[in-house]
Image (cartoon, rainbow, N blue to C red):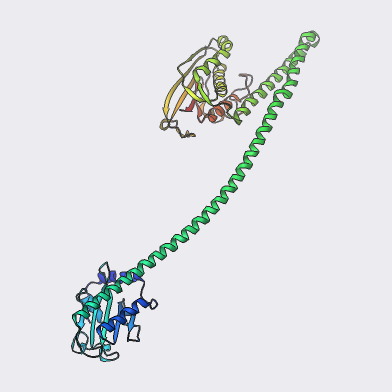
Amino acid sequence: MRTLLHPHEENNRLEALKRYDILDSMPEQDYDDIVKLASQICQTPIALISLLGEKRQWFKASYGLAIQETPREFAFCIHYILDDPAEALVVTDSREDDRFANNPFVTGDPHVVFYASVPLIDSSGFMLGSLCIIDHRPRQLALPQLDALKVLAKQVVNLMELRSSNKALRQSEERYAALSAELEQQVAQRTQELATANEALNDSINLISRSNENLQQFAYIASHDLQEPLRKVQSFGDLLKNQYADQLGEGVLYLERMQGAATRMSTLIRDLLSYSRIHTRRENTVEVSLNDVVKAVLIDLELTIAKNGANVEAGSLPTVLGDASQLGQLFQNLLTNALKFRRKDTLPIIRVTARWISAESLPTGKKQPTGAIAYYCIDVADNGIGFDEKYLDRMFQIFQRLHGRGEYAGTGIGLAVCEKVVTNHGGFISASSQAGQGATFSVYLPI
């Protein structure tokens, strides 16, 4: 027996046969009917659908033969691989054919004498096996019989491909059903998670609502109940100084210290109230002219500006979407700080300017909380005492002070209020400075 001429092609053929997943499959009536019909048309006692595997030939359907498979080297149809797979193979008398004379199935049972087969070639051109007929005596095959055998062979291939397609379709449907079931399970799970999350969110909203109500109650108490005793301390202190200053002597100094402490406490309560209110909400969101906001702040600070001999220059500022009251607090605090932290031997010069900046040009490390593509950058620059930038991270924290109370008055809340206002408006604030060379506070608001 000759060896295969093209091992690589044979491997491809075996892979093609494997994809049909037909070897060792259960009997099927459609295939059985074809071999029976082939036997009747060609008037032979045996008809087979033979599939040529790697080491055996296996019969998908057989008529007149009881065995299910044989060793590959005994298969007549192996010559389709060695010779021309496109032609029918007709052996009138195998006993006189050198290719088959010594085949065990010729010399012994089932005593194959006459053999004819048509190759089973699939749509990809692979020879999978053959539809064959066998007789125990020499004979000829009429042309109509051979044509019929070719038609039946095509039907075998069609059945195999249909079977393979149906199997792939079933597998696809099974995968679809599995994916649908998994998706439904995921949807149900996600729905449950969302329901749980919504419930937790509603609980959080209710908690925040109660917290806000408690905060408002605290604000009322702080505005009235806490401030009232402080006002009385101030009033009684003034009364004692006016009517009993002579008798008090050095006690007046302690009285003034007491009044100073009460004043600082009152200022601290007022600043805390401002901070808490900004922390909770933005009152009204409308188009706000920053020109108008800064002008109003400068009017409020007229006396302080005149007292310090300050020169305040405000350039053209943009109109933004926001809360006019909160933005007023923002610039009130920034300008107040610029006036407060002045150099003693220098008249304050303060400039308020604005410019447009793209999101890509934001300072390194600054986030884009609103996803805006551009921002207004409003700079408040002064020529005051400045600060060391190593303290920049703590400057906007509540109660943080870089100077003692004896040097500069304040509660350490003003810049924290500024940061809250800017955050409420979807922006951020930064600062740059060198000690003794002034400071610039930059407010970034989305366009």
Relative to 116, is 447 above or below?
above
Tell me which residue sits at (35%, 83%) in the image.
68
**Residue 234 visible:** yes
Q: Check the picture and name the quadrant holding the C terminus.
A: top left
Residue 155: image location, x then y, percent: 29, 73
Looking at this rendering, what residue extends furthest in the right direction?
247
Tell me which residue sits at (34%, 79%) in the image.
32
User: Which of these two is toward me, 398 or 39?
Assistant: 39
**Left-right relation of 174 to 216:** left
Q: Quadrant of residue 218?
A: top right
User: Which of these two is toward me, 367 or 168?
Assistant: 168
Tell me which residue sits at (74%, 16%) in the image.
234
Tell me which residue sits at (57%, 51%) in the image.
192
Residue 15: image location, x then y, percent: 31, 69
**Left-right relation of 339 to 208:** left
Residue 1: image location, x then y, percent: 23, 82
**Left-right relation of 129 to 408:** left
Q: Quadrant of residue 85?
A: bottom left
**Residue 384 visible:** no
Residue 443: image location, x then y, percent: 49, 25
Relative to 326, is 145 above or below?
below
The number of numbered discs placed on residues in the rendered structure image is 0
